[in-house]
Amino acid sequence: MRFLAFCLMFIVGIALLSCKNAKSDTSAPASGAAQNEAPPDPRSTEIGLSQQQIDAAMGQALKIDPQRCWGYVKQFVAIGSRPLGSAGHKKAEDYIHAHLKGDQVEDDAFSQSTPQGSFPIRNIVAKYPGKKPGIVVFASHYETNIWLPKTYVGANDGGSSTGLLLEFAGLLRDKVKSGPMDGYSVWLVFTDGEEAMQRDWSSDSLYGSRHLAEKWQQDGTSKQIRALLLADMIGDADLNIEQDANSSVRLQMTAFAAASHYGYQSHFYGRQSAIDDDHLPFAKAGIPVMDFIDLDYGYNNSFHHTPEDTLDKLSPKSLEISGNAMLGTLALLNAGAK
């Protein structure tokens, strides 16, 4: 009986622990694989390119400056808590806009009814033209949870990926100074309203991405997007990008090929899960998506959505691994990866 009671307590404990991972869910089908067809292994590098073509494409890939990127992260996190409707949120918007000055920037601004009332939400979209028909989107959310203490700064959750996208902006800005880039156009999307206003994630979240995905579906933009690559919680010093069942397997294979070129493969796909995150509304709009996310932040994810999410838990090296793998994925997509 004692053994049976122990087993029951263990099962209940695991169930309660799974509820803690607010961004983890199994509600959406995996994109990129036909129904009833076993998907290919995401660790495969069979992406329709020869090794010579992969090496050539990766030789042209943009690479981040990890220390400069780290500087963006530190400055952004110094803003502090930035939930919807707060002074910190306005400072976060202003910081992003200031670092996109001179770029082609559009705001997707709207009012959203939530369980905590109506709030202004602003998705920020920066566009960098390419010569090849089609668009590759890099995305990240930038706000923090309204229900967390004001001491919460979201260094990893929102801060790390926002800094990474600002680093991308500088690299892309330099590339388009003399005209459109070779390859696809690239859009950077700073999504807003990703976090739940209460603790029930299932219906009270992803406000900005749902609005933008619906807008793009209605105006035809979604048909032009070849891939949407989401960055979330990618600064963890102990980095392990999830193998996400809700991401395109083909994009995961392409990302793994890019990571392998740099010797980063040990940081990819050590865990399997199905992540409910900002990529899902776009997947439902028919866009191939991949979530670059490490959803095991601290022992048993103990730092996630707590005031312990601070800069000392992050590493510039993790930003370098995540950023270069994402930019390498873009290079392979431009080279015709399938």
Image (cartoon, rainbow, N blue to C red):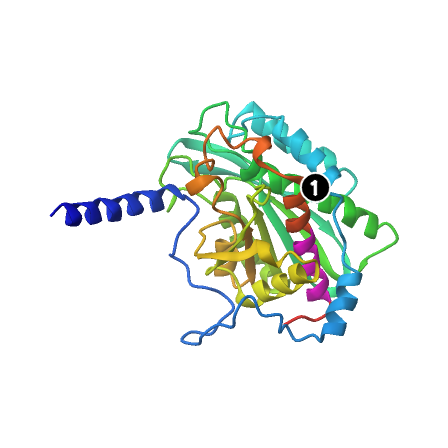
Front residue (pair 196, 306):
306
| Residues in magenta, as a range | 324-334
Q: Quadrant of residue 91?
A: top right
Q: Residue at x 64, y 55 (%)?
A: 137
Q: Is residue 326 magenta?
A: yes
| Crowd class of label 1 (few under 14; some 14 to 19; many from 20; radius 10 Å) | many
Q: Element under label 1?
A: helix
How far across and how far down the image is residue 107, in percent? 63, 42
Looking at numbered disc 1 in the image, what kind of residue is underneath it?
Leu
Decide if residue 47 is in sight here: yes
Q: Is residue 136 left or right of residue 244?
A: right
Front residue (pair 113, 151):
151
How far across and how far down the image is residue 105, in percent? 70, 44
Decide if residue 100 is in sight here: no
Q: Quadrant of the C terminus?
A: bottom right
Q: Is residue 215 magenta?
A: no
What residue did someone put label 1 on? Answer: 166
